[in-house]
Image (tube, helix red, strand yellow):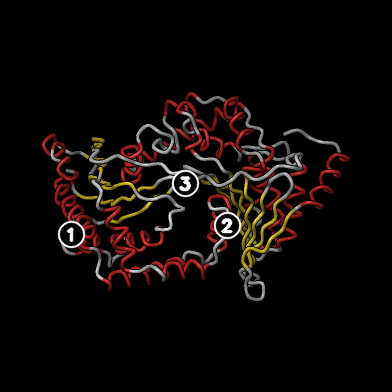
């Protein structure tokens, strides 16, 4: 990022004030829960949700870049860059960044996913200007020095090793590869030892400049915040870094498209000397914009979303074959996955797989009883609200919604969509999703005869 003269900065600031567009997306009662959005002329979007009754605020910046934007040789670059943005800017060292937030009792972190990256800080409402300045500085003026790249490489390799030491986590990466193969969505977010070792400071800098343009970013703040003040402070921080030089830029649109996953009957086994075998049995799901996502959410909750779910009752409560068993969905812009996870003794793998497959087949053919669907709807509605009880969760909701959907939905609207799901909706999505031939990923110390029988579970 290049510096600019005071005169040029003032001119850009005047232009920004002239053409910035502000909208009220959700109007709350007495200002509580009001969501507003301002789009600056440089294409930067700023979304806030106001909750005057709290004394905290969470500020985050979402970047429209994830591991699916990487070529094979760049696998892991997005996550590597996430680490490097904490290493220093022209105004702050790595210690300055962390100590500034620590000094006010705040917390700061970041996460990288397959389709986006988020950097955030949660502080007292009175310290929000500090959080805005620090996080914006990191995003717009990171130095990405070669010595920092070399130092952080070791930390990332340790993070990869830590993940590989946790087979309950690693099996989900294996399942993504089983279903999506050697594609951007099928590769691990962290990258591999080989790809991380091959990444250079110059390649990461080019990746940074390409994907961290203001048109690719969404700023989100939630809590006891004033929208207009947040906009002024964010705009000043970006202008200081010379990041709003364009006055005609438009924000990048949410990802779209449809990708068909035709994988069926694939089995991948990673043999390791673990105490448990970790399994994921699953099939293609649906894209995140698919209107059936509400019905699939209810189905997922009924099947494996809690202690009263079918899989928990059948596998753990009735037979004691696993401590952890659940189902889950992963949705992307153009496709999705549905999976059932269980961790069990290696000798019980085939029993667990048979029960899971039988339950999926039964629900696909016969559906779920109305009472199970009603219970799942109530559980999903409750967990949706309880999951939004802090400013960090609210920031995540409005930031991700703007980046991934390009629109906002109030909590009441979300609860309404869940309540509108009918038993027929759930049975229809069950036939479509669960009626497909599954694939299977396993990590554990399976013997040759056990491994040879894994294909029976997907036959």
Q: Earlier in the sequence, mark 2 or mark 1?
A: 1
Return the residue at label 1.
320
Q: Earlier in the sequence, mark 2 or mark 3?
A: 3
Q: CA distance from mark 2 to mark 1?
A: 44 Å
Closer to us: 196 or 382: 382
Q: Is residue 56 left or right of residue 130?
A: left
Image depth: mark 2 or mark 1 in front: 2
Residue furthest left in the image: 449
Q: CA distance from mark 3 to mark 1?
A: 38 Å
Return the residue at label 3.
333
Q: Earlier in the sequence, mark 3 or mark 1?
A: 1
Q: Quadrant of the C terminus?
A: top left
The residue tagged with tag 2: helix, strand or loop? loop
Q: Residues within 10 Å of mark 2 (few under 14, many from 20)?
A: few
Return the residue at label 2.
407
Q: Residues within 10 Å of mark 3 (few under 14, many from 20)?
A: some
- Specify whether residue 162 is in view: yes
- Specify whether residue 272 is in view: no
């Amino acid at each position: 990022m290049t510096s600019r003269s005071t005169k040029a900065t003032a001119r850009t600031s005047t232009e920004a004030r002239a053409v910035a567009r502000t909208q009220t997306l959700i109007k709350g009662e007495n200002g509580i829960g009001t969501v507003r959005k301002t789009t600056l002329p440089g294409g930067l979007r700023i979304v806030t949700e106001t909750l005057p009754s709290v004394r905290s605020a969470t500020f985050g910046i979402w970047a429209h870049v994830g591991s699916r934007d990487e070529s094979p040789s760049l696998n892991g670059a997005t996550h590597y860059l996430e680490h490097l943005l904490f290493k220093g800017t022209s105004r702050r060292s790595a210690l300055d960044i962390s100590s500034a937030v620590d000094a006010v009792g705040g917390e700061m972190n970041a996460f990288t996913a397959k389709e986006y990256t988020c950097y955030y800080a949660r502080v007292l409402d009175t310290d929000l200007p500090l959080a805005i300045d620090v996080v914006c500085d990191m995003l717009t003026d990171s130095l990405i020095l070669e010595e920092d790249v070399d130092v952080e490489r070791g930390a990332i390799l340790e993070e990869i090793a830590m993940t590989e030491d946790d087979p309950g986590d690693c099996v989900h990466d294996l399942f993504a590869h089983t279903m999506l193969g050697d594609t951007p969505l099928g590769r691990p977010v962290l990258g591999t030892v080989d790809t991380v070792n091959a990444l250079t400071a110059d390649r990461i800098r080019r990746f940074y400049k390409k994907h961290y343009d203001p048109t690719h970013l969404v700023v989100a703040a939630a809590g006891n915040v004033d929208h207009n003040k947040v906009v002024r402070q964010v705009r000043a921080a970006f202008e200081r870094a010379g990041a709003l030089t364009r006055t005609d830029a438009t924000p990048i649109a949410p990802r779209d498209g449809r990708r068909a996953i035709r994988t069926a009957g694939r089995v991948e086994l990673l043999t390791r000397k673990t105490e448990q075998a970790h399994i994921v049995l699953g099939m293609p799901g649906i894209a995140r914009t698919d209107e059936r996502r509400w019905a699939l959410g209810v189905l997922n909750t009924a099947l494996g979303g809690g202690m009263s779910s079918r899989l928990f009752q059948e596998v753990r409560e009735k037979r004691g074959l696993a401590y952890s068993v659940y189902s889950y969905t992963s949705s992307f812009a153009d496709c999705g996955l549905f999976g059932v996870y269980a961790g069990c003794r290696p000798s019980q793998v085939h029993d667990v797989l048979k029960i899971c497959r039988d339950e999926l087949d039964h629900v696909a053919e016969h559906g779920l009883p109305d009472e199970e669907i009603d219970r799942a709807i109530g559980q999903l509605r409750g967990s949706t609200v309880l999951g939004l009880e802090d400013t960090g969760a609210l920031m995540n909701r409005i930031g991700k919604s703007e980046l991934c959907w390009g629109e906002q939905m109030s909590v009441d609207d979300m609860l309404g969509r869940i309540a509108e799901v009918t038993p027929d909706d759930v049975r229809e999505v069950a036939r479509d999703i669960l009626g497909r031939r599954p694939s299977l990923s396993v990590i554990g110390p399976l013997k040759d005869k056990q491994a040879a029988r894994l294909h029976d579970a997907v036959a």
